[in-house]
Amino acid sequence: MTAAAPTSAKPRILISRAIFPQVVDRLASHFDVESNQADELWSPQDIARRLQGKQGALTTGSERVDAALLAQCPGLKICANMAVGYNNFDLPAMTAAGVLATNAPGVLTETTADMGFALMMATARRITEGEHYLRAGQWDRWAYDMLIGQDVHGATLGIIGMGRIGQAIARRGALGFGMKVLYHNRSRLPEADEAAVGAQYVSKQDLLRRADHVVLVVPYSAESHHTIGAAELALMKRSATLTNIARGGIVDDHALAHALQTGQIAAAGLDVFEGEPKVIPELLACTNVVLTPHIASATVPTRLAMANLAADNLIDFLLHGKALTPLNPEVLGQAG
Ligand code: DGY
């Protein structure tokens, strides 16, 4: 008689991209794990096939979870995003399918704010342009206007999107650099939070007219698509800079490239792009733009904390029916 194949009592999960090996090991102590440590770029069809028989998935912001995928994966119970942004999730479709969605807020706030500030400073002070100039052997003398830029200290900072990261940038600007802080957000902050950084709530138009440095930290949604387009860029000072660490699609990249080429604004710092990882040639051709490949949260401790929070959500939900950072908590009530 042949022995029956052993069956695993552990829930089964998929990790859709390469992550820290120690987090894979941690998850493997609770679950039957299929991981993607080779970091192949799986198509939606590959993901649907690999999710068969799985109850959970650890996703990054790159994998789309929508009605079409969910229809093919009836056993799926949770997708834990290793990102604070979750525009890769169709949340209503997940809720309708009874699939819990979680994200990774909080753990990346300060790191992402550091990067927003670094990008703004690099943009205002033309750091990467200066480095290219030097490396190209063009630096042969001092000149009063060589790579002359804009001040950050004491300038007016305009923040669009005043959630955790926006507030962390405001703190850096007000307390560290003596900046005057204007902000625009869907809802106004409590007075005490505004007072902590001396932030003044203004309309988007007012902010764009008055700010020396505009920083975008608004989450992506249909409503925030092209928050900054040609009309908004036309309101900005010609000496102003624009920094986007939010999401591609918040800025109309073609309109921005045009504004940079025509001197409508002085410079931009971009960590995110429409259609990334592709970047439109018009932006690549601009010298007055600092470009980074979506790395605002990319430090070792923060990326580890993001992966561990996603893992905690999978463990909490699949083993205990709860979750730390649910996006559709109504699904928790249906579990069990
Ligand atoms: C996030 O967490 O949303 C970041 O953009 C991913 O690195």
Image: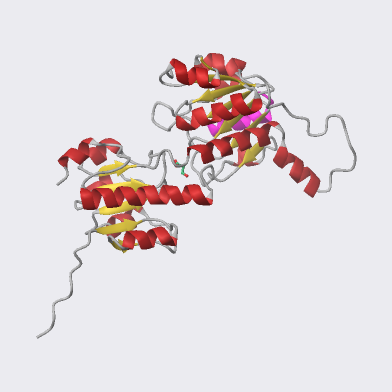
Is 132 located above or below residue 175 in the figure? below
Residue at the image position 44 percent from the left and 48 percent from the top: 305
Which residue ends up furthest to the right in the rendered image? Answer: 141
Q: How is the image coloured?
A: secondary structure
List x then y, in percent, for residue 241.
Answer: 64, 27
**Relative to 305, 284 lies left or right:** right
Q: Which residues are magenta?
A: 251-264
Secondary structure character of the magenta stretch overall: helix
Using the rendered image of the protein, determine whether residue 94 is visible from the camera's viewpoint. Answer: yes
Q: Nearer the viewer, residue 273 or 204?
A: 204
Q: Quadrant of the N terminus?
A: bottom left
**Relative to 129, 181 lies left or right:** left
Residue at the image position 20 percent from the left and 67 percent from the top: 8
List x then y, in percent, for residue 278.
Answer: 53, 46
- Say which quarter of the image contains residue 25: bottom left
Asked whether residue 259 is drawn in magenta, I would say yes
Using the rendered image of the protein, determine whether residue 273 is visible from the camera's viewpoint. Answer: no
Q: Nearer the viewer, residue 130 or 100?
A: 100
